């Protein structure tokens, strides 16, 4: 997000609800004193409200950040949500392109959903398209991590059939489409694309699984002074298909989500991104070659059906319980909610729905003509 949400004063107003960040910092300090006393004396600096799922507070001088959940996007109980996120950081950080986990603060009277203490990454927002090669390299580093034995994969999501699991997840979100006040053209197009994805799910073959982020939009990356891209939000990692991450990093609904990383990529730039990832992956890239467009469609459908779900649920009251999802607009600041509403309106509009459909068709033609995305690209620019 842009500098409107730079480091903050103690109080902000969101839709008539006062969020006292000094009070949040005080609660964090008490939780640190109870569970991590060596960190309790660190100066605490609340950061910008740039996401719907967490507040962030810097532990100044310690190289650490507190990630304090506002909700669980995966619908988990508070303790399970922390356990899941801790596993995300522990496993993905082995790639060298994700922050390390320092500590877990369990749910308590002060922090009902607990918190994670993670490594702070110092750098800047990604600049597109220039940083696309660095993002592709970071994702490939995660996708190349050895796949653990099935018994070692929990608590991370590890569906026996990740494509069917994705279709079911999208279908659950699509149940909100009738209440989301979509234009008829958008509803018809999204419904048709979902039917196409369901048809692809009837293919008998499946590609191999790896660890994936499932939240690889460019706004979740920080680029260090050395040019390395680091994925800093790891709430939804799972064992699934890497093309979902490649799509999430380059779809219109991702590259225009965050003000600081806003870009509208051309098919050629997307092709170069896929080519860079393929080069880093080496021979393994071929395992997913036939699935790039189908899974890109799936990631877009996940995104737009989430938009419909958010449009319906964001006007509701915040729940009193500390468990599960809570998309109420009252959980975040007014400027952030205004931004999200604008993006949701854009992504559900007929013009943008049809634009993404056209892009999918263009990329599909490139793949059909060449057999490989990398054959159509010139490599990193």
Image (tube, grey):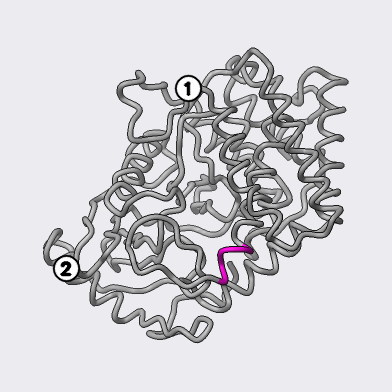
State how many labels appear. 2
The image shows residue 166, relative to residue 315, as above or below, that is above
Considering only vertical position in the picture, is 17 above or below 132? below
* Side (left or right) of 306 relative to 57: right
Name the residue beneath numbered marker 2.
40
Q: Is residue 197 left or right of residue 336?
A: right
Circle 1 SS class: loop
Neighbour tally class for label 2: few under 14, some 14-19, many 20 plus, Cα within 10 Å: some
The magenta span reads 311-315
Q: Quadrant of the C terminus?
A: top right
Q: Nearer the viewer, mark 1 or mark 2?
A: 1
x%, y% of residue 223? Answer: 53, 52
- 313 within the magenta span: yes
Q: Give percent across and percent down for residue 219.
A: 58, 56
Q: Quadrant of residue 348?
A: bottom right
Q: CA distance from mark 1 to mark 2?
A: 43 Å
Left or right position of 208 against 24:
right
Percent across and percent down for residue 271 are 76, 34
- Residue 142 on the magenta span: no
Q: Quadrant of residue 96?
A: top left
Residue shown at 69% from the left, 63% from the top: 343
| SS class, disc 2 | loop
Q: Which mark is residue 160?
A: 1
């Amino acid at each position: 997000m842009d500098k409107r949400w730079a480091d903050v004063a103690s109080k902000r107003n969101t839709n008539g609800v006062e969020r006292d960040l000094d009070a949040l910092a005080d609660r964090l300090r008490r939780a640190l004193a109870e569970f991590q006393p060596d960190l309790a004396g660190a100066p605490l600096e609340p950061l910008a409200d740039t996401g719907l799922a967490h507040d962030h507070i810097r532990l100044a001088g310690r190289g650490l950040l507190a990630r304090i959940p506002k909700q669980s996007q995966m619908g988990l109980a508070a303790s399970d949500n922390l356990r899941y996120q801790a596993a995300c950081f522990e496993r993905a950080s082995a790639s060298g392109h994700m922050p390390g986990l320092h500590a877990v603060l369990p749910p308590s009277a002060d922090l009902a959903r607990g918190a994670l203490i993670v490594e702070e990454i110092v750098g800047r927002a990604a600049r597109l398209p220039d940083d696309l090669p660095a993002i592709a390299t970071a994702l490939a580093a995660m996708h190349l991590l050895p796949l653990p034995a099935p018994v070692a994969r929990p608590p991370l999501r590890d569906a026996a059939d990740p494509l069917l699991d994705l279709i079911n997840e999208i279908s659950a979100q699509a149940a909100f489409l009738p209440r989301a006040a979509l234009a008829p053209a958008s509803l018809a197009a999204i419904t048709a694309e979902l039917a196409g994805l369901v048809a692809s799910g009837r293919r008998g073959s499946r590609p191999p699984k790896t660890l994936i982020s499932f939240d690889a939009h460019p706004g979740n990356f920080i680029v260090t002074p050395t040019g390395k891209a680091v994925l800093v939000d790891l709430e939804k990692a799972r064992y699934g298909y890497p093309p979902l991450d490649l799509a999430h990093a380059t779809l219109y609904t991702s590259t225009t989500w965050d003000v600081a990383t806003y870009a509208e990529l051309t098919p050629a730039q997307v092709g170069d991104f896929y080519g860079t990832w393929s080069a880093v992956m080496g021979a393994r890239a071929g395992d997913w070659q036939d699935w790039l467009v189908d899974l890109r469609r799936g990631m877009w459908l996940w995104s737009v059906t989430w938009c419909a779900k958010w449009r319906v649920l964001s006007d509701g009251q915040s729940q009193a319980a500390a468990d599960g999802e809570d998309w109420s607009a009252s959980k975040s600041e007014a400027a952030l909610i205004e931004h999200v509403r604008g993006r949701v309106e854009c992504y559900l509009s007929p013009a943008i729905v049809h634009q993404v459909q056209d892009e999918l068709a263009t990329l599909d033609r490139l793949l059909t003509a060449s057999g490989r995305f990398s054959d159509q690209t010139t490599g990193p620019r």
